[in-house]
Amino acid sequence: MKKQAIHLCVYNKNVGDNALNLAIDSMLEPHFHLKHMGLLGNKFGVHEVRELRATDVVIFGGGGLIHSYSPSNTWKRTGTMWNIRLQDLASIPNPIVLYGVGFNHFYGEPGPTQQMKLFFDTLIDKGALISLRNDGSKKRLVQHFPHLASHLQTIPDPGFFFRPKPARWRRPHAILQIAADRPQYRFKNKPRNLFRFIRKIRPLIKHELVVVPHTADDAKLYQTKHFNVGDHMAYPFKPEVDATKKIIGLYAGAEFSISMRGHSQICSIGNNTPTFTISTHPKTHGLMEECGLQEYCYDYGSENQDQGYHKFEHFLSHLDEYRTRLKKLNSEFDACIANFNQQVIR
C-alpha cells in the first residue's frame, strides 16, 4: 500500500524547478501518493502544519531552496524557503527528506543566518534524510557550519532525471541561456560586457541559436533594448509545468547549449547534450567540477574574454567526446539516484 507524502516544492515559477520536481514525482509516484504544497508565500500556519503532521513522509526539495539571504526578511524562521517555525518543525512525527537541495550563495553575499543552523540541527535531531545536490553545495555549506559535514550526503540534482523526447527546431539548433537575477553579483551591473562576449563567439556557432529564458528575470532582460547577442531566435517564457516537457525537449534535441544557470546545465547534461558554462555563480562552476567537466567552464569573474573564447573553441572541437563522457556520467548518476530513492522508500 502506498504511503502518503507531501512534497514541498516550487511549481509554475521557472522551467528548471518544474523539471526537477517532475523528475522527483515520476521517481517516487510508484511508492507514494504525493500531494504538493507550495513554498513561496506560504506562512506555514496552523492548517499547513496540521497537514504536515498527518502525512507519512515530508519531502522538501529539490532546487536551490537554501539561501544566505531572504527577500524582505520573509524566510527568517529557518533561513530557507521552508519558512516554518522551528517548534512546528520539531513536532512533525514522521520522516523528513531533503531531496537534493542546493545552497544558492553568491560570493560577496552575507553568510547564512543562525536560524539556518538551528533548522539543520532540528532536522538532525529528528533523524531526517538530508541530501544536497552535486554543485558543491555541501562544500560551501560546511564552510559556515562544519558540524554538518557528517550529516549531509550529496546526490545528483534530480533535474538530471527529467528526460523527455528530443524536440527539433526548424533546423539544427543550439541553445543560449543567460541568467539575469541579481546582476550586481553576476556581472557587477554590467551585462553589456557579457553580451559583447556572446557576440564575439557568435561567428563560431554554425547552428541556429535559440535563446531560452528559465525565469521571469531572464525573460525581462531578453526584452530590453540592451540585449544584443547577435543573430538568434527567441523562445517565449513559459513557466507553467505543462510547457516544461517541450522546453526541455529542445535541450535534448540541441547540438549543444551555452548555460549560465544550473538549471540549464542540468537540463543539458541529463539529456546528453554538451553544455558550455559561463559561470557567474559558485554553483555552476561547482557542478562542472563535480562532473569532471571544468575544462568547458568559463569563469566570467576571474578569466578574461580571450580565455573564454579559446575555451569555447576547445568545447566546439570536442563535442563528440563530450557526449560520450555524458553517457557514462548519466549512467553513474542513474545508479546513485536509484540508491538514494531506496533510502527514501525505506
Image: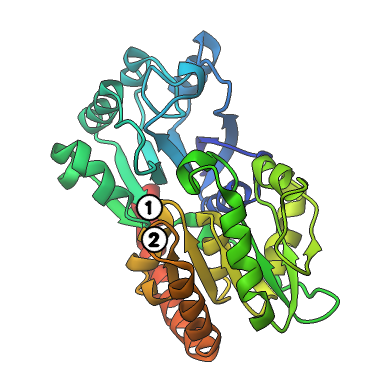
> What amino acid type is highlighted by mark number 2?
His
Local packing at callout 1 (Cα closer than 10 Å; few below 14, some 14-19, many 20+) is some
Q: Is residue 178 visible?
A: yes
Q: Nearer the viewer, residue 60 or 251?
A: 251
Compared to residue 336, the image places residue 280 above or below, namely: above
Q: Is residue 125 left or right of residue 231?
A: left
Q: Is residue 164 visible?
A: no
Q: For the point 35% across and 59% down, which residue is it?
A: 286
Q: Is residue 342 left or right of residue 193?
A: left
Dot 2 lies on which element?
helix
Rendered location of residue 248, percent (x, y): 67, 62
Q: Nearer the viewer, residue 104 or 106?
A: 106
Residue bearing the label numbered 1: 282
Compared to residue 3, the image places residue 312 above or below, namely: below
Local packing at callout 2 (Cα closer than 10 Å; few below 14, some 14-19, many 20+) is many
Rendered location of residue 19, percent (x, y): 61, 53
Q: For the point 69% across and 45% down, which residue is it?
A: 221
> What amino acid type is highlighted by mark number 1?
Pro
Quarter of the image where one finds residue 220: top right
Q: For the point 86% across and 76% down, which residue is it?
A: 170
Q: Is residue 148 left or right of residue 318?
A: left
Quarter of the image where one finds residue 65: top left
| 1 and 2 marks in contact (CB < 8 Å) | yes
Residue bearing the label numbered 2: 285
Rendered location of residue 201, percent (x, y): 61, 75
